[in-house]
Amino acid sequence: MVRAKAHKWVYYFGDGRAAGKAGMKDLLGGKGAGLAEMTNLGIPVPAGFTITTEACVEYFRVKKTFPKGMWEQVLADLRKVERSMKMGFGDAEAPLLVSVRSGAKASMPGMMDTVLNLGLNERTLQGIIKKTGNARFGYDAYRRFIGMFGSIVLGIKREKFERQLENKKAERGVHHDTELDEDALKAVVADFQALVKAETGKPFPQDPMEQLTLAIKAVFDSWYGARAVTYRKLNNIPETWGTAVNVQAMVFGNMGETSGTGVAFTRDPSTGERRFFGECLLNAQGEDVVAGIRTPLPIEALREKVPSAYRELLRVYKTLERHYRDMLDLEFTIQEGKLYMLQTRVGKRTAAAAIRIATEMAKEKLIDRETAILRVDPEQLDQLLHPMIDQSAKVRIVAKGLPASPGAAVGKVVFTAEDAERAAAKDEHVILVRTETSPEDIGGMNAAQGILTARGGMTSHAAVVARGMGKCCVAGCSAVHVDESAGAFTVNGVTVRQGDFITLNGSTGDVILGEAPLIQPKLSKDFQVLMGWVDQTRRLRVRANADTPHDAKVARGFGAEGIGLCRTEHMFFDVERIRAMREMILADDVDGRQRALAKLLPMQKSDFLGIFREMAGLPVTIRLLDPPLHEFLPHTEEELAGLATDMGVPLEALRAKNKSLHEFNPMLGWRGCRLGITYPEIYEMQVRAIFEAACELAQRKVKVLPEVMIPLVAHVKELSRIKELLIRVAHETMTRYGKKIAYTIGTMIELPRAAIVADEIAKEAEFFSFGTNDLTQTTFGLSRDDAGKFLPFYVDNGILPRDPFVAIDQEGVGSLMQMGVEKGRSTRPKLKVGICGEHGGDPSSVEFCHRIGLDYVSCSPYRVPIARLAAAQAVLKNSKKKRTVSDTR
């Protein structure tokens, strides 16, 4: 009988690969795959093994117990590590210590847990001291282990360990951990052990196997920790992935001045400059750099302190960048002059850096242009399109820290993540000020406009997370002294209190008092180069949703190829115009409405003149009035009384009219084409304004391409009736001006019935534009305004993968869209089809629109570059055979 092969839950370093066809990143996680790959490349990596992401998923499936056979595989590979390192786990003479680290498929810096120095107890401590001849080192490693294991595995608040350590430093009159001698550290160990006994009722675990079991479980459990869950939501990382666990032999950076630890990037992660960039600490362990406990030294400091290790590090980083063909994030430890690599992964970078790295690597022939396009996350471009500080403004700079994440931010000072989240919920802009951030601050960091820390470097938690989020960050500003309990910080003699405004310049590190004026940034030459490649690659056109000449100008500056949605109702909310609009609504007959509309016509025409002028030569899709009339009326008694006085209308009459316009469900009521059919004089005025503007510009030799769009059509007869009116008014207007304007008439597809009968509607419509906001509402049978009460719960609990108003629900709404495209083109093969809902700027939705054959997407002006890049990536991701982009293109 042949025994079934046991499932492989554990991979020894070197058994797996990170790159190529045999890449195992999904299984080993990014960290594990990188360690395996470095081992295969012959780079010095301490021995270890990876417990797979599958094991994590199975662990939760079987109620937090290890999968069958996993522990036995752990023990087998642990024996291999012992043989490789010539040490024994738990051995009193030559003790092997290990680290236990998380490592998901996607980088989640600081979001899950790590335990270092595992395997230390009273017996192995003496072995370490005897083996190294360095008692201070041994006790330093032990106190670190107890503190880390106690907080992460045993659930004791980290602050309690930190308080005891701070008390000991104060007692000894020193400022840094490195200044504590052997006796002081021995006392800290005793204090930490007493704290564990007091908090748990049990002594600190002494069995190394028990320590390892509990640590592996703790790392698995951290996949569902609060900060990891928050990070996954912010970055759209599926909870089904799980995390791998890496168990690796410890090497020590805290064995003296020829030992150290550091984090480095093969190129500058903030600017993208081609230079080796990083930070290090001598006589320290890795968490000291990442946590910002000590302000680190630049990586070049190693050249003087440990020159041979520095030369080896330069060789390794060049080898790895050539191998991976990308900018990498490296972690290393130097133990008594010898270099060990602990991690390599694709490095997080700002949008500006991502673009520069992609374009320069393409020019260096490391990657091709298609790869360069795919290297930039479309959502990251949002970082480039936000304000910067006006350089001509006079500002009061009170301190300077490290420029950890570029951009600028203005907001009120808050000192806790919770306060930041509460303020953001009230639409207040805040700056989160911390001595140093920790992973628990993730929610507040996301809510804040910017982050300021007193400690930490360019690779601290605050810096790395802020860059990933696109948040402005100034780190390591040592002049800032935070007193959270007093709700204030002092900086160079100035006290700044909670609620005071400050401004951060993340590009220079400046901390500025008050609200500095901000201006729009200029896009770099690298951006223009990349977008040139993007535009040569994409098939989808990209338009903008713009209602004013200013919006149209901004959109065109960002590369919009027309306007896909001009919402005419937004033009009526101006203070002067709303009066005429209300007169029209309150009129009792057609003549009264027409008199009020005559006042609106020149105002409406002036808007179209400005928009057409800005979009000369490009199509402009104008949606006729869509919302219900009651939206234009005041609703409080005080507002109604004021309006009645202004208009000379009896209050009772106004109140009655307001009541008559009330609807139980206005989004499904008298609006859109239904309003245009019952009150045709409204659409007649709007069409006249459109064509008067077009004809006047045509007389000045300005090319205008109007597309008139009729909203909320459910039946072809609605469209045909309004179309007849539009053609008549357009013809009358052009005849009056003696000009002929090329124009088209189309409709929005925003009701399920319209998608189902799209073949009939296409007989009258020359173009379709999917209004995915309303189509989502009517498909799901929910109100976007009210869905906030439950949609977040649905997403959090896995009922929906994403908010359907953020990303197209491809199975439901998407199926209706595909049906509409196919049926519409069955009647009119060259039917132009686009999308004008908010989804037009969402990368996943843009890719879906590409797949179902739309001609264009339309989005807000500041999302246009994002949509352009997403459209190019859609071509590359969906092409059956990868196209080659020649260098002469």
Image (spheres, rainbow, N blue to C red):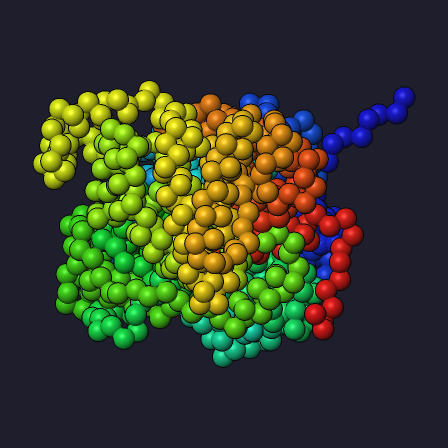
832 versus 882 height, above or below? above
Extreme residue toward the bottom, this view:
304
Q: Is residue 469 left or right of residue 272?
A: left
The quadrant of the image that shows the N terminus is: top right
Residue 340 at x, y = what percent? 60, 62
Residue 474 at x, y = what percent? 34, 63
Give me the residue at 80% from left, 30% from top.
Answer: 5
Q: Is residue 724 left or right of residue 878?
A: left
Residue 308 at x, y = what percent? 59, 76
Give me the residue at 47% from left, 38% from top.
Answer: 725
692 versus 817 height, above or below? below
* Residue 474 seen in this snapshot: no
Residue 677 at x, y = what percent? 42, 30
User: Residue 753 sits in which quadrant?
Assistant: top right
Q: Nearer the viewer, residue 31 or 689?
A: 689
178 versus 51 height, above or below? below
Give me the residue at 37% from left, 65% from top.
Answer: 520
The quadrant of the image that shows the C terminus is: bottom right
Give me the residue at 24% from left, 65% from top.
Answer: 516
* Residue 62 seen in this snapshot: yes
